[in-house]
Image (cartoon, grey):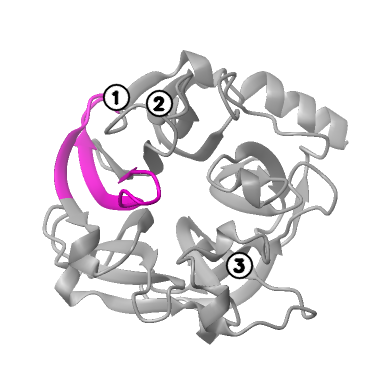
């Protein structure tokens, strides 16, 4: 049954990322210069895309996040942005846009200037171009849910509930280190001392989320033995399936590749990509990560961050018509 499902997904859903259209270029060529971490949101006829610009360590890291709008899902106009200085942070990461009865809501992940742990805040506005970061509210700080970091929200609505998948950093019980030492790099994911897993939180109103716990963890000794971060979830007649970012060790942090997992209930996931990633770039490290999608008029628009020959990452879209 798993093999049949795997073949069905590979033949009808997966795509060649090299053929994608470049939506945004990085700020400069070379390693450490990225544009990506996309989050897609369809509101009526309008596509919205959250994404961020990143420079190498020592030059700013995640310096800016933006929201862009499009009519065709390919050509985007920026309508809002926030700089790392506005959040007093050393780096911003993936944002997520959603809509509730109270208006549009933006979930922002960034390094907490207080303790150097990744955190997630929420901001509500009447329009997607009116978010005021001075009015942000705490959604999750890592210590409150027993983690060393929490970031990269992914939102799924089903059966009257909102599910938020988040990247979380956990440390082994045998590790004894002060929090100050563990987080002195301002990115615990790069230390090799943690595991990067996916956890989930659930909400009835799309605003206030309750942490549930881990749902997808790294597979020891395999290509995704250090990281397993769900980046998008799609509902099908056969259940749910997800793209996730995987890495074997801390050296592959920032350069993850894409695997696939399936679930019947969003809480229990089975990896199909056990022997290796299913989507990679042919360039450099092979990085192909942060896949998200929008579905409109029978066409799926897949957005993703992609390694170029010069080591930089660009932001691309691939369109697939469903038959």
- Quadrant of image for the N terminus: top right
Q: Is residue 59 above or below residue 36?
A: below
> For this rendering, which residue is in front, 114 or 177?
177
Among the two numbered marks 2 and 3 on one chain, the one whose residue lies closer to the N terminus: 3
> Does the magenta run of residues contain 304?
no
Q: Nearer the viewer, mark 1 or mark 3?
A: 3
- Quadrant of image for the C terminus: top right
Q: Residue at x 51, y 16 (%)?
A: 18
Asked if the residues shown at circle 2 and circle 1 are in contact, with their CB atoms under 8 angstroms apart, the answer is yes
- What separation in Å lies between label 2 and label 3 (alpha carbons)? 29 Å
> Element type at marker 2?
strand
**Mark 1 highlights which residue?**
74
> For this rendering, which residue is in front, 133 or 232?
133
> Element type at marker 3?
strand
The reply to whether residue 2 is visible in this rendering is yes
Q: Position of residue 194 (x, y in %)?
A: 67, 66
Among the two numbered marks 1 and 3 on one chain, the one whose residue lies closer to the N terminus: 1
Q: Quadrant of residue 280?
A: top right
The crowd level at tag 3 (other Cα within 10 Å; few <14, some 14-19, many 20+) is many
Q: Residue at x 65, y 58 (%)?
A: 266
Q: Position of residue 192 (x, y in %)?
A: 67, 60
**Mark 2 highlights which residue?**
317
Q: Position of residue 256 (x, y in %)?
A: 60, 41
Asked if the residues shown at circle 1 and circle 3 are in contact, with their CB atoms under 8 angstroms apart, the answer is no
Among the two numbered marks 2 and 1 on one chain, the one whose residue lies closer to the N terminus: 1
Q: Is residue 264 above or below residue 255?
A: below
Q: Is residue 144 left or right of residue 47?
A: right
Q: Is residue 127 left or right of residue 121?
A: left
Q: Which mark is residue 169?
A: 3
């Amino acid at each position: 049954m798993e093999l049949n499902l795997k073949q069905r997904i590979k033949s009808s859903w997966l795509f060649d990322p090299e053929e994608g259209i470049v939506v945004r270029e990085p700020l400069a060529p070379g390693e450490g210069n990225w544009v990506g971490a996309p989050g897609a949101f369809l509101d009526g006829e309008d596509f919205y895309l959250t994404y961020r610009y990143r420079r190498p360590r020592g030059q700013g890291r995640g310096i800016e996040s933006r929201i862009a709008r499009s009519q065709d899902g390919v050509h985007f106009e920026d309508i809002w942005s926030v700089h790392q200085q506005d959040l007093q942070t050393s780096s911003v990461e993936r944002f997520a846009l959603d809509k509730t009865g109270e208006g549009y809501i933006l979930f922002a992940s960034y390094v907490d200037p207080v303790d150097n742990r990744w955190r997630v805040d929420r901001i509500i506005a009447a329009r997607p171009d009116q978010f005021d970061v001075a009015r942000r509210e705490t959604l999750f700080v890592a210590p409150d849910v027993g983690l060393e970091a929490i970031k990269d929200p992914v939102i799924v609505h089903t059966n009257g509930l909102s599910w938020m998948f988040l990247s979380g950093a956990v440390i082994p019980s045998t590790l004894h280190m002060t929090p100050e030492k563990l987080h002195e790099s301002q990115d615990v994911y790069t230390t090799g001392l943690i595991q990067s897993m996916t956890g989930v939180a659930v909400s009835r109103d799309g605003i206030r989320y309750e942490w549930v716990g881990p749902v997808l963890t790294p597979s020891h000794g395999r290509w995704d033995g250090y990281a397993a971060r769900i980046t998008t979830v799609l509902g099908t007649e056969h259940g749910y399936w997800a793209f996730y970012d995987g890495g074997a060790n801390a050296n592959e942090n920032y350069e993850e590749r894409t695997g696939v997992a399936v679930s019947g209930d969003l809480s229990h996931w089975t990896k199909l990509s056990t022997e290796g990633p299913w989507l990679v770039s042919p360039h450099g490290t092979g990085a192909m990560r942060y896949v998200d999608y929008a579905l409109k008029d029978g066409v799926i628009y897949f957005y993703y961050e992609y390694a170029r020959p010069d080591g930089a990452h660009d932001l691309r879209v691939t369109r697939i018509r469903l038959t």
